[in-house]
Image (tube, rainbow, N blue to C red):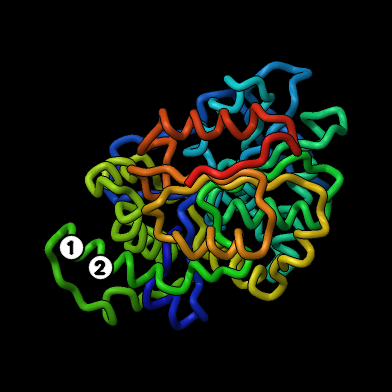
Amino acid sequence: MFRLMRVARVANALVIPIALVCLLTLSSAHADYSTPAQTVWLDDQKVRYHLMGDAGAPVAIVLGGGPGFSSWNLEPVQRRLAELGYRTAIMDMIGVGENANGGELPTGQALLDVWVEQIEALRRAVTDERPVVLLGHSWGALTALLYTRTHPDAVHRLVLLNPVDPERRAMRDVAEQIDRRRSRELGESWDDERAWEQPMGGGDDSAATARHQIERSLPSYFRDYAQGQRYAEQFDDSDFSPRLNIEGWRAYRADPVDYATIREWDIPIDVIGCRDDLLMPESLDSLQANLSLARVEVLTGCVHFPWEEVPGAFTEALTRIVSRPAGQGAGNTP
């Protein structure tokens, strides 16, 4: 997840998680979904989504992060789930990427309500009303919890991948960690006060802010800094909305999902995390202290994108979780 450094501190610690990442200024080629888009309607808005897997198979929905980022970079996770026997759906949230729709979204809590009902519209489109597996990465873990709070009977299992903890305790020192990592890797010093004082408005300013922030932040979410730089070259301005990022975090802070509510759900919750993730160990410590988790898989050799950094180990961990029937064989990997 990215933190909008100086802007974030002024704006009450707003954060950009990188579950869905974006752009460097010199993108050589913009990647995208590899499967054709299908559509479902939410009121008067057309929502595009992408499916993998056989009809009739149990359904999994992959939720990316941000908020306000495109989701195509999670397609390898979608593919793994399809290979494991799931009919798997993925989509951009309304307001960004191929679901930008050129329109204005509501602000405040109504924004999150729209996104929750977008997920419900997708679930109804791809399943015969059976509960689904929700896999949420980074901010997407919070999206999964928000959806489950409204539709608990629609969820069969929650899989949280390098999640933001519901109380956001892991977010407190992210900006400082990025600063230290960048300075160490590039051997440069720069004026933190001046570098991050940029407007967060729309239009060109919004795009420039996104490029400025992500060019400096994304590589820090990879163990191999150079791999992170190469990864970022696939993204462009269409993948990110700074306004939705700010609005999403503001809305969640106003009405977070509390642990007491989560404990009321009869739903297995599994966690896959990277030992070196910038959210670790605080996020996992918070989850384990407040919830009875079904299974925890902690991977080494990765920071925030295990399907890119350690694809073999990630696939094995995902297989151990989703191939096990809900409620069976709870355990933890240290």
**Left or right of residue 129: residue 148:** left
Q: Is residue 68 visible?
A: no
Q: Residue furthest left?
A: 187
Identify the element where label 2 is drawn: helix
| Residue 197 drawn at (x, y percent) | 34, 78
Mark 1 neighbour class, 10 Å CA radius: few under 14, some 14 to 19, many 20 or more:
few
Mark 2 and mark 1 in contact (Cβ < 8 Å)?
yes
Q: In the figure, 85 relative to 182: above or below?
A: above
**Left or right of residue 43: residue 221:** left
**Left or right of residue 137: residue 113:** right
Identify residue type, mark 1: Arg
Q: In the figure, 308 relative to 4: above or below?
A: above
Kindly identify the residue that appears in the image at 85 percent across and 32 percent down.
130
| Residue 7 drawn at (x, y percent) | 42, 76
Please give the label number shown on residue 180: 2
Kindly identify the residue that appears in the image at 72 percent across and 57 percent down.
146
Q: CA distance from mark 1 to mark 2?
A: 6 Å
In-front residue for pair 32/163: 163
Q: Quadrant of residue 176?
A: bottom left
Q: How many marks?
A: 2
Identify residue type, mark 2: Arg
Q: Is residue 106 visible?
A: yes
| Residue 182 drawn at (x, y percent) | 23, 62
Identify the element where label 1 is drawn: helix
| Residue 255 drawn at (x, y percent) | 72, 72
Kindly identify the residue that appears in the image at 26 percent across and 77 percent down.
192
In-front residue for pair 60/317: 317
Mark 2 neighbour class, 10 Å CA radius: few under 14, some 14 to 19, many 20 or more:
few
**Quadrant of the rendering where the N terminus is positioned:** bottom left
Please give the label number shown on residue 320: none
Residue annotated with mark 1: 184
